Image (cartoon, coloured by chain):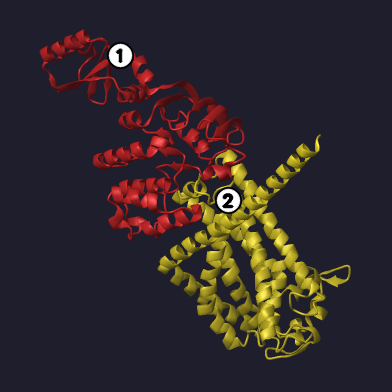
Chain colours: A yellow, B red
Amino acid sequence: MSRSSKKKSTSNKQKKAVSKVSSFYNNFWHNIIIVFAVAKRYLLVDFRYKFQLVVEAGWTAVNVIVFILLGAAWQATSGEDLFIGVPYDMITFFVVSTAFYTVFGGTTEGTVNALPEETSRGTLGLLITNSVTPISVLIGKYLASTVKYLFILIVVVVPALIIRGAYPKSLELVWASLIIFFIAWLFMGSFTLILASISLIFKKTETFNKVGLYVLRFISGAIVPIYSFDESAKIFGIPLSNYLIWFPATFCLEAFRWLFIVPSANSLNTGGVSSDKGNFESFESVYGVPIKSWTLSDPVIQLLLVINIIIFIGAMLLVKKMTTISRRWGTIEFY
Amino acid sequence: MSRQPAIEASNIVKRFRASRRAENITILKDVSFTLPRRKGLAAIGANGSGKTTLLKILATLYLPDEGSCQILGYDLVKDARELRKKIAFVSPNLEFQKKLTLKETLEFFARVQQVDMANSMDFIEFMGLDEKLNDRTETFSEGQKAITRLAIAIMKDAKLLLLDEVTATLDINRKEDVIDYLESYCRDRSLVLIDHSARVVERLCHRVLMLSDGQVQKYVRVKDLLDEMPFKYNVVMTPKRRLTNRECQAIWPDYTRFGGLIRFFAHSEDEIRTIAARILRFRDYINFDISTVSLQDLAMSWTSSEKK
């Protein structure tokens, strides 16, 4: 090969590479625009179904009241011996659970139903042929639902949290709460995408979704504290809760309870005295999670973030794969 | 890329999964055709012949199980993402978010496609729907929804339009307006159309793809198809009462019933004169019309054979 033809071939390769990068960059921004446009569309629609919004807010208020009563009854009958080490009592336990699942339970339920709703309404075909893929629909809906349920959270649940004294008491704790919120948002987003991808192939998945969400609530320790079985359930001599805590939803929910009730960020590592329960131990000594600072510089937090980003990307690829299968089987438009 | 045909479909097969034990249902069998650029194609055939499935494959909604297809130089399967920017698909089953206004709906589609709304606004104004811009689509009639669907399709300046019965729900005046608009809009674009109205097909398409049981029966120019018709004229009679077969045959042996009407087929003007004279003598009729053949006749004969 002559020198000039070699030069030409290298220049062509470079051109192709540049064009690929530029195309990737354009597609990436186009996708971001689509996702935000979809989110705006859902927000407009969700807030126009006012009766539905009022019912959901009312149902959340009922949940808060019921779980406060349940927590009070639990405390009155069981005493507090079971909960040695953690800084919160059972009322806070349930109120934070309610807050967590008001946002993430509502968001998940709203999003997994997005594709079946679009399909039954006949809008999915129009969206797909206009560059709006099922992934864009799901992520856009997830964003919109997050805003909607944060609104319900602020109106209905936050007052209850404030009355209970369950809120971050310092700026450090606020930042830590935001980081944990983002990790939880990523994980619940992945969970939602995985559930939603099934609806591309199988129809009438509502019950399956409800079961999935219920199991998640249980594993994440929203209904029963994860350390309840520590005395009887040990694996290699280590309490069950020390394993369960590594499940992202469990970790985030439990972290919120601590972040909302401890008096300072430092006391998460040293233990201290909380308004709910008096003396408590450090997070590490209760769950064995070696977090030194609840910031992005902590290796454990970094690990959780990276793992959840990977899970999220994996969930998106799953939706893409399921979309291809449903296009082949023709189930993409059927409901 | 621009020299390539608008569509080059080769041996497309589409099967749908039936129940687990049953065999898959084959909807399209080895469908092949080529559509040159800036030409219109009408897919016609009886219900269940595979027209809509074919259109949905071309619109990248379904994936073919076998065969290949190049659209505007893009591979239908590999380049679906790019292709969606170049094609527009309209189907009567496509709906909108009912709580959004017409303006919000158009703005959404303009945003996701990163295009200007000017084309669709022109069309909306042309169709007199601009007064409804701030109305929610839940208040729209089927005809207004059909116009909105077309407005979305027109928005992105697509090079290939895939239209499935876009005029079916329109009243006669609006249908004419839409045909007029599409006639001028499709001059430098390619079109694949499904429409039961032969008048729409005749005005917008150059070629006809006749499908039967998922297979291509004929792929011909509209003019050739009309030339190939087994008769040149037809007389449609509206009788006062239901006629017996013997009475019909007494007027003319080559006939078919269509609803309450009877159609007599003629090959020449002489035969027309004979039929007309016999009907006049028969007297038990309300009226009768004489016309030359059109795709309307073809559609009627297809529908008629489907009923049989």
Residue at image coords 41%, 56%: B105
| Up-down relation of residue A28 to residue B270 (above or below) | below
Measured as percent of width and height from the top left, residue A228 is found at: 75, 75
Amino acid on which the number 2 mark rests in the picture: Ser
Q: B2 or A32: nearer the eye?
A: B2
**Mark 1 Cα within 10 Å, few/some/many (few <14, many 20+)?**
some
Chain ID of residue with mark 2: A
User: Hey, which quadrant is residue A289 in on the image?
Assistant: bottom right
Left or right: residue B44 versus residue A295 is left
- Residue B80 showing in the rendered view: yes
Measured as percent of width and height from the top left, residue B161 is found at: 44, 39
Left or right: residue A326 versus residue A239 is left
Residue at image coords 42%, 36%: B188
Q: Secondary structure at mark 2?
A: loop
Q: Secondary structure at mark 1?
A: loop
Chain ID of residue with mark 1: B
Kindly identify which residue carries mark 1: B231
Measured as percent of width and height from the top left, residue B155 is found at: 42, 49
Label 2 and label 1 in one chain: no
Amino acid on which the number 1 mark rests in the picture: Phe
Kindly identify which residue carries mark 2: A199
Measured as percent of width and height from the top left, residue B95 is found at: 42, 49
